Amino acid sequence: MLTIKKDDARNQVELISIDQLVPQDHLVRKIEKAIDFDFIYDLVKDKYCENNGRPSIDPVVLVKIVLIQYLFGIPSMRKTIAEIQTNVAYRWFLGYGLNEEIPHFSTFGKNYERRFKDTDIFEKIFTKILEEAIKHKFINPEEVFIDATHVKASANKRKYYKEIIEKESKNYQAKLEEEIAKDRELHGKKPLKRTEKVETKEVKVSKTDPDSGMLNKNEKEKCFAYSFHTACDKNGFVLAAKVTGASVHDSVMFEEVLDEVIKNTGKPKAVAVDAGYKTPYIMKTMLDREIIPVVPYTRPMTKDGFMKKHQYVYDEYYDCYICPQNEILTYVTTNREGYREYKSNPEKCKDCPLRDRCTASRDYTKRIYRHVWEGYVEEAEHLRHTPYNKEVYARRKETIERVFADMKEKHGLRWTTLRGIKKLSMQAMLVFACMNLKKLATWLWKRSKNPTPLRELYPIFAKIYTIISKRKANPTFYVYKKWGLSSI
C-alpha cells in the first residue's frame, strides 16, 4: 500500500540528549569505552602556557578530530570538519553539543606547526594504544611480519631536477669490512687498501616534495612516492613503522624496524619477510639474534640454458666448489663487496662436454662468487622447508598484506596530500594508531558481549577430566576430545 508522509517534522522541537541519538554499537562508542584519552594532556602540557594567553581548543579534541579523519578514511581536514558538523556520532565523540561551533579546519594544521612539529607526541599516542592492546593480551608478538608499501606523494612526476649525490655506505659497512679482513687473513691474503674514491649516483629530486623518492618498480607507473616500512603481529596489530622516500630499498630499513618491534613488544620467535629482504646481512642479523627467518623461495638468476649455482656443490671443509664433472673450483680472492671468488682450471674446462651450459667466458674459466655470510642464507633456505616456516609464511597475506590493503582502502592512504617526511611520519603514526585502536575497541566490545570465552573454560574442563580419569580406568575420551582437551 502506498503511504504518503504528510507530517513535516523538520521544525519540530524535541527534548532529547545527543547521547540518545548515537547507536550503542557505533564505533565511536566502542573506542570511547576502550581507552581513556586523558593521557594526551600529559603529552602536551609543556606545549601550552598554564596561566597566560587565550584559551586553547582542548588538545584531546584536536587529536580526536584527526583520529576521526583517519578512522573513517575522510580525504581532507576540510571535509572532516564538514562531516563533524552534521554527524551526531562525531559530535558525541568530541563531546560537542548540537549547537556548539566546531573548530575551523585549519586549527589542527596551525597547532601542528606551532606546537607538535618535531616532537614525538604522535609516536607516543601510537605506543599508548599498542600498550593497551598488550595489556588486554590481544598482541601476539611471537611471529612478526615485516614489509613495505608505497604511498604516492603529492608531487608532479614531471617536475623534477637531476642531482649528483654521493652514494650512501651500507649501514653494516664496518662489520662487512671487518669480516672481509678476517677472511682474507684466513686465506693468507693481504688486507685490502683503503680507497678514497667517492662513488656518486644521479637521482631525480621532486621540485614539489624533495623528501619523496622516484618509484621505479617493474610494471608500476613511475611516480614520486614514500615507503611505509611496517611490522605487524599475526593478529594484524601494527607493532612498528618507519617512513622513507620510495627510493630507499625495503631491506635498508629492516634492522631499524626490527629494533623498534623489540623495543615495543620484545624479541619475536620468528620474522617473516618477502624475497626483497633475503640478503646475507639480514639473514645473519636474525640468526645471530636467535630469531627464525621465514623467507620465500627465490628463483635462480642464471641465464636460460646455463646450469644453476646450486648444481655446483660447496665443500666447506676444503673451501672449494665441485662442478657436475667432479672438477674443483679453487679459492682466488675476497673482493671489497664481501664475495669470495672461486675459479676453475681452464685446461680442464676447455674440452668439457658441459662447457656450453657452464660458462661462456672466452678464457674457458668458470667463476663462482660466494658471500662471506652466504652460510646464513643457506641456513634460512634450509629452514624454509620446515612445516613451521611454511605455516608462518602462508599467513603473510592475512597479516601484513591485509594491513596495507586496509590502510589504503579504508583509511585514505593510497596517496597523501601532505608534503615532507616529518608530516608523513606523523600521518603514518596516526593512521596505524587508528587501525590498532579500531581493532582494540572492536575486540573489547565483542569480549564484553561474551565475557567468558570457551578458551578460558579449558582449564576447568582439564581439571574435570583429570578427576574422572583417576576415578575410572577407561574414561570416555571422545567427550573431552570434542572440547579440545586431548591436547591438554
Image (cartoon, helix red, strand yellow):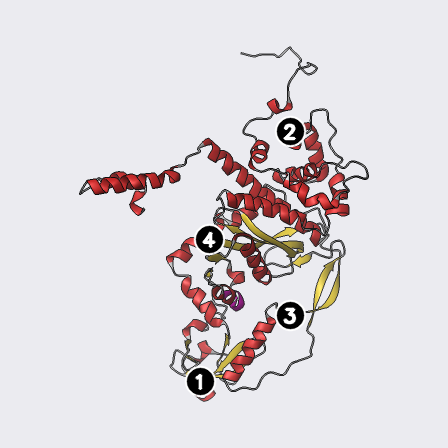
Query: Mark 3 is on which residue type?
Result: Ser
At numbered mark 4, what does the secondary structure look like: helix, strand or loop? loop
Residue to which mark 2 is pinned: 92
- Gap in angstroms between the C-alphas marked 1 and 2: 81 Å
Residue to which mark 3 is pinned: 169
The disc, 2 or 4, on the residue closer to the chain's N-terminal end is 2
The disc, 4 or 1, on the residue closer to the chain's N-terminal end is 4
Q: Nearer the viewer, mark 1 or mark 2?
A: 2
Q: Residue at x 54, y 56 (%)?
A: 262
How packed mark 3 is, by other alpha carbons closer than 10 Å (few <14, some 14-19, many 20 or more), is: few
Residue to which mark 1 is pinned: 349
Tags 2 and 3 in contact by the CB under 8 Å rule? no
Tags 4 and 1 in contact by the CB under 8 Å rule? no
* Residue 169 location (% of width, % of height): 64, 70
Where residue 57 sits, quadrant-wise, is top right
Q: Nearer the viewer, residue 104 or 273?
A: 104
Q: Is residue 297 above or below residue 362?
A: above
Where residue 163 sits, quadrant-wise, is bottom right
* Residue 435 location (% of width, % of height): 57, 43
Relative placement, left or right, of 115 versus 453 is right
- Gap in angstroms between the C-alphas marked 1 and 3: 38 Å
Query: Mark 4 is on which residue type?
Result: Glu
Start and end of the magenta stretch?
Answer: 279-283
Whether residue 282 appears in magenta in the rendering, the answer is yes
